[in-house]
Amino acid sequence: MLKTVFVKGDENLKLLNEVKAFRLKIWSELIGIEKAKLRFGVEIDAEDLRAWHCVKYDNQKIIASQAFNVTNNQEELVDFCSYERYVKIMRFPLAITNRLVIDSNNKQMGLREEFYNLCLKKAKKLRLLELWGESRQERTQFHSRNNYKDMGPSSDKSIDGDWRILVKKLDE
């Protein structure tokens, strides 16, 4: 049975620990466990505690998750290493969607779209001005279809690939 929840990290530490373990499992399959631990850590961090989390279950097993970080100013900005060169053009309040992971057996289920719609609905409810995200170049078609603008390369080089910074204006 499929189920989706959208919860605040600091309100459900049990779920947050499950999300953290799931994220490390998925990323370690892609880049190796040591690199995944280095990039995402092994402990729950302040960003995960502060974020909202979209989590998809299949029979009580996590199959996908994504973080949604509301940011009111530059000091609260998550993943600063990725967005550093874009800070001066950001309009606050905004949200950063990040840490998306989908189990390889569930990639074609429309989960990215489902999470996008949940985050967009939450962003509008909170009257945020922009949604920012980071994606590999080969996955930006989804963002283009949903009116994101490619701002350029990510400043973060901790994971190989052509990572792009994307923004969607919510007040236009």
Image (spheres, grey):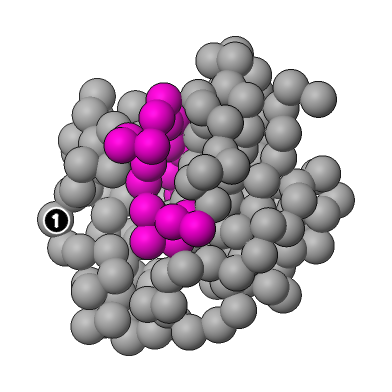
Q: Secondary structure at mark 1?
A: loop
Left-right relation of 164 to 8? right
Vertical comparison of 133 with 152: above or below: above
Q: Quadrant of residue 156?
A: bottom left
The residue shown at (26%, 59%) is 21
- Residue 81, horizontal then vertical, whole percent: 37, 61
Identify the magenta region: 65-85
- Residue 72 magenta-highlighted: yes
Left-right relation of 99 to 170? left
Vertical comparison of 57 with 157: above or below: above
Along the line of sight, which residue is nearer the eye, 43 or 153? 153
- Residue 168, horizontal then vertical, whole percent: 71, 40
Circle 1 packing at 10 Å, graded few (<14), some (14-19), many (20+), is: few
Identify the image quadrant of the C terminus: top right
Q: Amino acid at mark 1?
A: Glu
The residue shown at (64%, 19%) is 124
- Residue 79, horizontal then vertical, whole percent: 37, 54
Vertical comparison of 164 with 69: above or below: below
The residue shown at (50%, 58%) is 85
The residue shown at (54%, 15%) is 126
User: Residue under circle 1?
Assistant: 43
- Residue 142, horizontal then vertical, whole percent: 77, 56
Identify the image quadrant of the N terminus: top right
Left-right relation of 116 to 143? left
Q: Is residue 4 visible?
A: no
